[in-house]
Image (cartoon, rainbow, N blue to C red):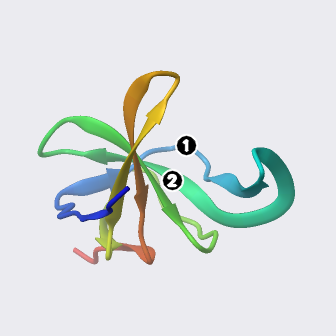
Amino acid sequence: MPSYSLNLNNVITTNSKPGPKYLHVDGVRTEKITGYSYRLIDMSKGEALNVTIPTEKTLTSGSLVEVINPEGTPYIYQNRPAFSIKADDIRPIKS
């Protein structure tokens, strides 16, 4: 499926801890971690988003952040449309 460039502005962090994303081979999860998923809130749309980046980092809850090079990929999960978002990084915006 094609991937789409996204424009994520006005995004804040939640108090959720990042979750590891594991490599799957032939539908079976391996122990290899491929990235970490962060729960963010898009304040302009009022939507919660999961964004996966390659490295684990510490982000303060409620901080305004910049999502670097976000890319979304639509897919089907349990007969429902879903959207995966990967990015190069998530950086706090200094106020």
Which of the labelled discs sits on residue 80, or is there none?
A: none
Binning the other alpha carbons within 10 Å of mark 2 as few (below 14), some (14 to 19) or many (20 upward) gives many
**What kind of residue is marked 2?**
Tyr
Label 2: which secondary element: strand
Q: Quarter of the image holding residue 55?
A: bottom right
Please tell me whether residue 74 is drawn above or below residue 94 in the rendered image: above
Who's the residue at 32% across and 61% down the image?
A: 2
Return the residue found at the far top: 79
Q: Are marks 1 and 2 in contact (CB under 8 Å)?
A: yes
Could one spot residue 86 in this view of the protein?
yes
Who's the residue at 39% across and 36% down the image?
A: 82
Which of the labelled discs sits on residue 16, or is there none?
A: 1
Mark earlier in primary sequence (1, 2): 1
Q: Nearer the viewer, residue 60 or 35?
A: 35
Who's the residue at 61% across and 53% down the image?
A: 18
Label 1: which secondary element: loop
Which of the labelled discs sits on residue 38, or is there none?
A: 2
Q: Nearer the viewer, residue 87 or 60?
A: 87
- The image position of residue 72, as x and y in percent, is 33, 57
**What kind of residue is marked 1?**
Ser
Quadrant for the C terminus in the image: bottom left
Quadrant for the N terminus in the image: bottom left
Binning the other alpha carbons within 10 Å of mark 1 as few (below 14), some (14 to 19) or many (20 upward) gives few
Q: CA distance from mark 1 to mark 2?
A: 7 Å
